[in-house]
Image: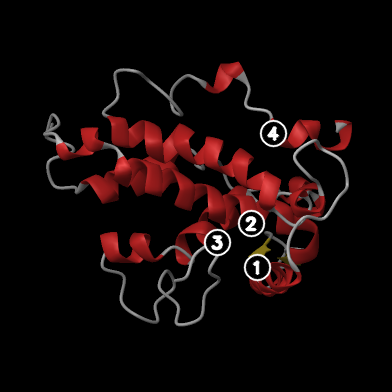
Amino acid sequence: MDQLADRFVILLGILNDIFYNPDYIPVFNYGALGAVVGHEVIHGYDTIGIDFDGNGKIHPWMSNKSRESFDEMAKCIIDEYGNFTLTDSNGTVWHVNGTNTSGEDVADNGGIRAAYNAFKSDPVNEQPFPRTKKLKDFTQDQLFFMAYSRVWCSPPLADKDFERSFEDEHPPEQLRLFGALRNFVPFREAFNCPAGSKYAPEKYCKVYAPS
């Protein structure tokens, strides 16, 4: 159980801006904190979590057919993220180790879907919300993805941080954001991304989803 303990922790301190504010319209909290909660829950069903049972003991529980489907999904993620790169100021191209990051990548992709589904099923979103001057031109779905993206804002990697960042089990922030959004059809629909474009590729990974 100790091996998994750190994978399911949501620290109390995160219940602040920009992740959560009780005065926000609900969509902002779903897009930010909701995705964090979804991410941590999906860790129970990522490339490590699926080998543990409900008591935290190593005991694979999937049927053979389900495991085959999961492995196919995981391979898609590993291959996809393994092709993500960043280039430092010296021109060195750094590649994500898709195998090393697969647990976090599955959790990111599943987490945004869980948060979005929760947001869409909440009746409060059918009610009118304050349309400030800055928000009046955006749909609820667009605001959800804007809230999600905002939590990933970070300065560009300094050259000295590339090695550490690419050895971590988490990909660099901007690649985590890119991967989760390009694989999620509601994002491309919300912003009318042209088919075949960077955020609406013909081939993409379907994480715990039929499409």
* Residue 184 image offset from top left, x and y in percent: 44, 63
- The residue where tag 4 is placed is 8
Q: Residue at x 55, y 23 (%)?
A: 14
Q: Are marks 4 and 3 in contact (CB under 8 Å)?
A: no
Mark 4 or 2 closer to N-term? Answer: 4
Disc on res. 106: 2
Q: Are marks 1 and 3 in contact (CB under 8 Å)?
A: no
What quarter of the picture does the N terminus occupy?
top right
What's the distance in space between the residues labelled 4 and 3, CA to CA? Answer: 19 Å
Q: Quadrant of residue 32?
A: top left
* Residue 15 image offset from top left, x and y in percent: 50, 20
The answer, for residue 37, to whether it is visible in the render is: yes
- The residue where tag 3 is placed is 208
Left or right placement of residue 82 versus residue 153 in this view: right
What's the distance in space between the residues labelled 1 and 3, CA to CA? Answer: 12 Å
What quarter of the picture does the C terminus occupy?
bottom left
What's the distance in space between the residues labelled 1 and 4, CA to CA? Answer: 21 Å
Query: Which tag is nearer the camera, tag 1 or tag 3?
Result: 3
- The residue where tag 1 is placed is 77
Mark 1 or 2 closer to N-term? Answer: 1
